[in-house]
Amino acid sequence: MSFAQAGRVTGLFLYPLKSGAGIARGSLDIIGEGVAGDRVFMAVDDRGTCITARDTPFLLNVEATPHLGGLHLRDRAGGTQLLVADTASGGALPAVIWGSDVLLDDCGDRAAEWLSSVIGRSCRLARWTARSLRDGRFASVFLPDTAPLLLANRASLREIEARAVEPFEIERFRPNILVEASEPFIEDRWARIRIGECIFDCVGPCDRCVMTTRDPAGGDGHPRHEPLRTLHSFRRGDDGNVYFGQFLVPRVLGRITAADEVEVLAWQEPRIAPPPRLYHRDSLRLALLEESRGAQRTDALTLVCAEVVEETADCRSFHFTAPDRPLPPYRAGQFMVFDIPHRSGALRRSYTISSSPHYPERISITVKRGSDGGASQWLHETMRPGMRLAARGPYGQFTIEDHPHPKLLMLSAGSGITPMMSMARWLLERGLPVDIVFLHSARDGGNVIFAEAIADLARRFPDRFTAVVTITGDGAAAPARRGRLGLALLQETVPDLAGRQVLACGPEPFIEHVRALLAQVPGFDFARFAAERFTAAPRAHVEAGTYEVTLAVSGKEVCGQGAPVLLEVMRQAGLAVASSCEMGLCGTCKCKVTRHEGIALAETAIDPEMSVLTAQERAEGWVLSCVTVAKGAMTVER
C-alpha cells in the first residue's frame, strides 16, 4: 500500500428509515446530500417529533428496503411485512428533528398502524420531500442528525474490542462506509479522501450516544453500557463527548463500491489526541477476546446435577449438565441465578460459577452451607445427581476479560475463592501468557476450599502460578501461613505488586482490609484494583413522589408525580437541552441545581466513579441531568 492509498472499502450500508435496520449494499450512489435513499423515511410521534431507537429500540427491528414503486417494510422480530406505495400519502406532516422544523409527507394510515404495532407506540411514518432539506452541522442533509455520510475504520473497532475484551458489531455505529485502514484511528488525520469516483472532505469525528449500547439485532441495552463505556476511557474530546468515526461531506459526486481503495488526498491534525498505547496487537487481550466471542447469556435453562463433591465439611461443589441444549458459554468469574424449590417457596439465589470455561461440558457452583435454613442448606441436604434445577445466566462483570493484565494478584477469603479458581484454572489451562500470585485466607486448615486444586495448579504451572494460603485461626499446617493477610506478607510474596492487576473477592471487611493494605503500597494505582463482594452494594432506589422543578433559565415551574430524570423534565418544559450519552458518562447535559432536598441518582446511573464531574463541581451543585432524579422542590440553572 502506497503512502496515498491508506485503506480499502470493506462494507457499504444504507439506512432508508432513520433508526431502522441497516442494509448492506455492493455500491452506493453519492449525491450532494449524502447517499441516495439514505434516511429519507422517519417515524414521528403524535406531536411530530422524531422518534429514534435511543428511546424506542424496537425501531432497530424494522428493515426498510427500497422497492419498485414503494418501500418494503419488514419486522425482523415478528415477521410481519408491509409494502408502502410511493403514491400513499396522508398529506403534509410538520415535524421536528433535534430542534429543526421540517415538512414531511405522511405515508398514510395503513403505514402508521403497522409501524405503531411494531415499535409499541403511536407514530406516523413520514418521507422526505424537497421542503424538508435542512442544514446539518457541515452541509445540507435529508434526515440524518449531523452530516451527509459517516465513515468507520475496522482497525479502530478492533482497538475498542481489544480494550473492552469484547466483540462488537459495526452496526452499532451505523456507518455508511466501512474501511479497512492501516492502523486504528488513522482516519482522524484524513482531511480529504478519494473513494471510487467520489471525493470527500473529512469534516470531523462523530460524537457517540446511547445508540451504540443498543443491540442492533433487537435493541436490548448492553449490561455494561458498552462500547460507550470503553470509548469514554480514551476517546473523549474537550467537550466531554466521546467520538468514533468520521463525518464526510461529498465534493465530487458519483458511485462508490465495496471494492474501492481509499486514497488520502490531504492530511490534518487529529481533533482527538491519539491514545498513548494501542492494544489491538496485545496477545493476551486478543486471546481473551477470541474466547469471549459468542459468550452471550441465555434467558433460562434447565440443569441436571451430574455430581456432588464435598470440598470441606461445610462446602460442596455441584456439577451440572444440560440435557436439552448446549450449556451457555460463560466468562470465568461470572455467576448464574438459580431457582431453588424451597419448602417456604421458590428462592432465587446467585452463585458464582467455580468451573473453568476450558471444560464446557459442565458448569459447577461451589456453595458453603449456611445455618439459616435457606437455599444453601437446601442444596446441601436435597440436591443429588439426576435432580433438575432451573437457572438463568451467566451474568457478571468480575471477569478477567474486564480486567486483562499479564501479571495478576488474586486475593480471596472464604467462599470468595470460587471466581478466583475459575479464572486461574482457565488462564493456566488455556495456556495464556500470565503470571498469577494467588493468596487465599481461610478460618482454619479444615476450611480451605479447593486445597487440592490449589496444590495441583502450583505443581503443574510452577512458573506461572504462585500460591500462599493464610489461616487466621488454629490449625495452620504446612504450606499454609499462620495469621491475617498483612503488608509484610504482600511485600514478601509480591515484590512487584505496584505493577500488577489486583482482583479481590470475599466479605466486605476483607475487601476493606485489602484496600487499606494496597493504599500503603508505594506507586500502586487503584485503577488496577477490582473487587467482588458476597453481597452487591445496594443501589439507590428513588421512590416515586411529588416534584416541583423551577427552571431558572425560562422561569417555568414543572410539577408532577413520579421519579423522572431532570433531562426529561426540562425537555417536557420545552427546553432544548444538549445531551449525548444519556447515561452519566459524557457531561454534555450537566446543569447546576441551586435548591434541592437532596440529590438522587437514577437506578440506571453509571458508576459514580466514572463521572466527568469534578469534586469541586459536585460541591457547587453541578449534576448530570440525564441521571439525576427530579425529587421534591428543586431549582435548576443552566
Image (spheres, rainbow, N blue to C red):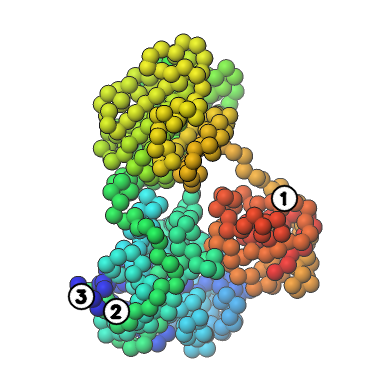
Mark 1 residue crowding within 10 angstroms, few (<14) / some (14–19) / many (20+): few
First-in-chain label (2 vs 1):
2
For mark 1, what is the residue?
544
* Residue at mark 3 to residue at mark 1: CA–CA distance: 62 Å
Answer yes or no: do the residues labelled 2 and 3 have beta carbons within 8 Å? no
What type is the residue that disc 3 sits on?
Ser
* Residue at mark 2 to residue at mark 1: CA–CA distance: 55 Å
At x 49%, y 25%, the residue is 485
- Secondary structure state at the residue bearing disc 3: loop
Quadrant of the image for the N terminus? Answer: bottom left
What type is the residue that disc 2 sits on?
Val
* Residue at mark 2 to residue at mark 3: CA–CA distance: 10 Å
Relative placement, left or right, of 592 versus 405 is: right
Residue 144, image x and y in percent?
47, 76
Relative placement, left or right, of 496 versus 428 is: right
- Furthest residue toward top: 475
For mark 2, what is the residue?
264
Residue nearest the observer in this picture, 275 or 454: 275
Residue nearest the observer in this picture, 236 or 516: 516
